[in-house]
Image: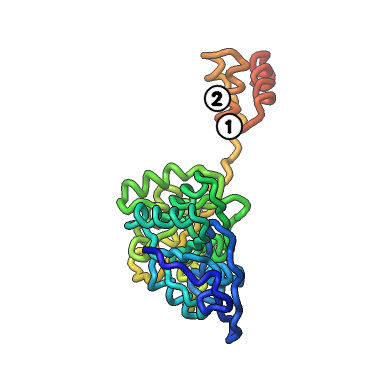
Amino acid sequence: MIKEGNRGREMSDGNRFEIAGHSIEARPLSPGLYLVATPIGNLGDITVRALETLAGADILACEDTRVTRKLLDRFAIAKRPFAYHEHNAEKAGEQLMTALRAGKSVALVSDAGTPLVSDPGYRLAGLAIAEDIKVVPIPGASAPLAALVGAGLPNDAFFFAGFLPHKDKGRRDRLAELADIPATLIFFESPHRIGATLEAASAVLGESRQAAVCRELTKTYEEFRRGTLGELAEAYRQAEVKGEIVLVIGPPPEPEAPGEADVDALLQALVADMPAAKAAAQAARQTGLARKDLYQRLLDLKHGDGA
């Protein structure tokens, strides 16, 4: 059974929070589902808007009530959190949906970071959206973004891939699927698997590809270890590792432009089996060169120019 907050009780303890010893009353929230980002380590990274939302919501749902209780105690929020996690998502989700249908405000948090990123919160958000219930993101800490900006790798395009499969074959197959994506790759990884993951990544993606192992982000022993996948695989091969890890791998290198002789050989092989226009188009797909230039080169070869 869900225990609601103290909405409607003026100046109630349940709708207050404290910052540096100053008590602040949170305004009641309008009905809807609020997805609240919480710190990934350093509790000082919580936002004022997040605190107002946690204190002002009718219901506070979380993955682990013990973890969330530490955050609530730090900021003197007298809310009783309601457990919503992977193992009870169906039953607990329906209870939360019942509350949302009744016009309640529900704040959802994960153990750390932004809800819906590698946690079951997306199911609840999907149900709410399907019933036209307001869903409000309350942004804040995010481990993938913190790792990305601290890794020093290209960040104009990035692809968050969550956790890799536990077994080696599945891990390598997944890496192979992602190998040619022209973006920096971001993964969550456990400390006891990081060595095996780096070995697999070095083998599949290439040992010269740049990467960074980002450990214990925002915490006392925060660490960024940067290098090539080959260097990092060697460094972590026998290492005893502790703490939460985000692995960031830079994008694949730009393919080298093929030499003129290679292009000519490809064009001549293709035109032997298809019309010149089609051969030029196929060569363009394989080399990345302009179709128009390749067609002109075919004409030159046909007339003996440069052949």
Residue 267 in view of the camera: yes
Find the distance from the CA under tag 2 to the CA under tag 1.
Answer: 10 Å
Estimate how packed mark 2 is, as few (under 14), some (14 to 19) or many (20 or more) residues with alpha carbons within 10 Å.
some
Would you place residue 98 above or below residue 266 in this image? below
Q: Which residue is mark 1?
A: 287
Which residue ends up furthest to the front in the rendered image? 9
Residue 227 in view of the camera: no
- The image quarter in which residue 66 lies: bottom left
Could you say which is closer to the camera, residue 132 or residue 167? 132
Query: What's the residue type where badge 2 is placed?
Result: Leu
Residue at position x 64%, y 14% from top? 302
Estimate how packed mark 1 is, as few (under 14), some (14 to 19) or many (20 or more) residues with alpha carbons within 10 Å.
some
Query: What's the residue type where badge 1 is placed?
Result: Thr
Could you say which is closer to the camera, residue 74 or residue 176? 74
Label 2 element class: helix
- Residue 200 at x, y percent in the picture: 37, 52
- Residue 194 at x, y percent in the picture: 38, 61
Q: Is the residue under label 1 in contact with that under label 2 (CB below 8 Å)? A: yes
Would you place residue 197 above or below residue 11 in this image? above
Would you place residue 294 above or below residue 148 in this image? above
Could you say which is closer to the camera, residue 216 or residue 42? 42
Of the two numbered discs 2 and 1 on the same chain, state the one appearing first in sequence. 2
- Residue 265 at x, y percent in the picture: 55, 24
